[in-house]
Image (cartoon, helix red, strand yellow):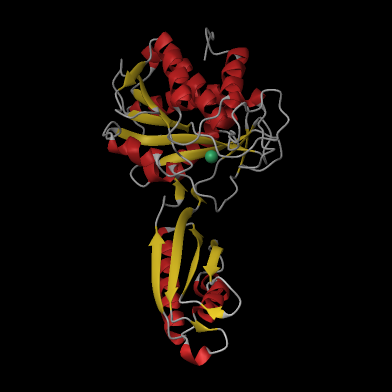
Amino acid sequence: MTSLSFVQESTLFDFFTDLHRHPETAKEEFRTTEKVRSLLSAHGVRLLDTGLPTGLIAQIGGHRPGPVLALRCDMDALPVAEDSGVPYASEEKGKMHACGHDFHTTAVLGAALLLKEREDALHGTVKVLFQPGEEINYGAEVFLATGLLEDVREYYAIHTCPELENGTLGIRPGPVMAAPDRFSVTLRGRGAHGAQPQNALDPMPAMAALIVGMQTVVSRRMNPFAPAVVSVTHAEAGRTWNVIPDTAFLEGTVRTMTPADRDLAEESLRQMVLHTAASYGCEADFRYLRQSAPLINDEALARFAAETARGLGFAVRPQDDTMIGEDFAIYLERRPGCFIRVGTGGGWPLHHPKFHVDPAALLPTARYLAVLIEKRLSSLSAPEGKG
Ligand code: NI
């Protein structure tokens, strides 16, 4: 990158701190969308018509032939009350950028403007996705449904990482984030007086057996070398001390890292729920809701992203696995791509009220992403190469 007419540290810092002061939760990113739109428009960046109330898709390049790549960020905040102590803390009560999506938006915006400055040199096109509603598994689906991404060949995205310092990126091929699935169980028995179990089909012991037994899907059915989590997070039954209830309810989450493990976990839980309920004389309604897929980084693209980072002086570490989910995985079910963790320091975990990032990472991240996209377009257009 040569001279930086707009994209300077202070400009990015001001944009970022403004977003941080005014966080907007999923599907309500109106102000954020407007800010990004006005800055992109002021720099002559073309915006595509998504027909959506929030979020933006910008298009840069196309002056020279070549493929279409996508660079995606998310824009939504969380319903968390901030306690970070930063001087630009949230001014919106009970809302906070506690996952760093304000950082993503600003760094990707910086990259978009750098790419705009290099537009004539790009061997192809980049679609820059300012996505709404990541936290509720909404944005990727609706962006894909616009039909504007049919021609995208590869997808790239970043996420803040408090465990790494500024100057370090976490990049690894293969599965790096989990499928964040959700389940619920409704047990139906027969209520009775608490003193007369002979008149009841008590759902309580079935519920208790399931809370403990569901853990054995991980310990006894799954490969011990394959990470998996089953967490029962909500249980409800009964209202008082001397009445056996009719029904009991459980819900929770299942996290797996591969499609095969996901199938195995779902089917094992279903069998356990139905047969455990039956063994207590109860009926069970088991619901399993698949959300985004496991996030699987493409091998060659992860290598390309890591080499590019090292070339710019970044340290690159293998990305830690996490059982958290990320809706970027929905794009990667369709096309290859790479999800890159950006060292932003701070020490506090994602979604924590004290979470904060090091804004000094903004400009290096913007530059890295711009170089990554430009280099990747060149390598895909080179006569010999697929990169
Ligand atoms: Ni996030």
Q: Write down the quadrant of residue 260 in the picture.
A: bottom left
Quadrant where the C terminus is found in the figure: top left
Q: Write down the quadrant of residue 42 in the picture.
A: top left
| Residue 336 in picture, x, y percent from top left | 38, 42
Above or below, 35 against 386 in this view is: above
Residue drawn at (70%, 33%) of the image: 84
- Going by the picture, which residue comes out furthest to the bottom? 198
Above or below, 304 against 117 in this view is: below
Above or below, 206 against 185 in this view is: below
Q: Who is closer to the viewer here, 42 or 190?
A: 190
Q: Who is closer to the viewer here, 182 or 191?
A: 191
Q: Write down the quadrant of residue 270 in the picture.
A: bottom left
| Residue 368 in picture, x, y percent from top left | 54, 25
Above or below, 191 against 151 in this view is: below
- Going by the picture, which residue comes out furthest to the right? 85
| Residue 325 in picture, x, y percent from top left | 50, 49
Give the number of marks.
0
Residue drawn at (37%, 36%) of the image: 154
Q: Is residue 128 visible?
A: no
| Residue 191 in picture, x, y percent from top left | 47, 81
Image position of 313 (left or right of 308): right
Q: Who is closer to the viewer here, 379 or 346?
A: 346
Q: Is residue 273 visible?
A: yes
Residue drawn at (54%, 8%) of the image: 3
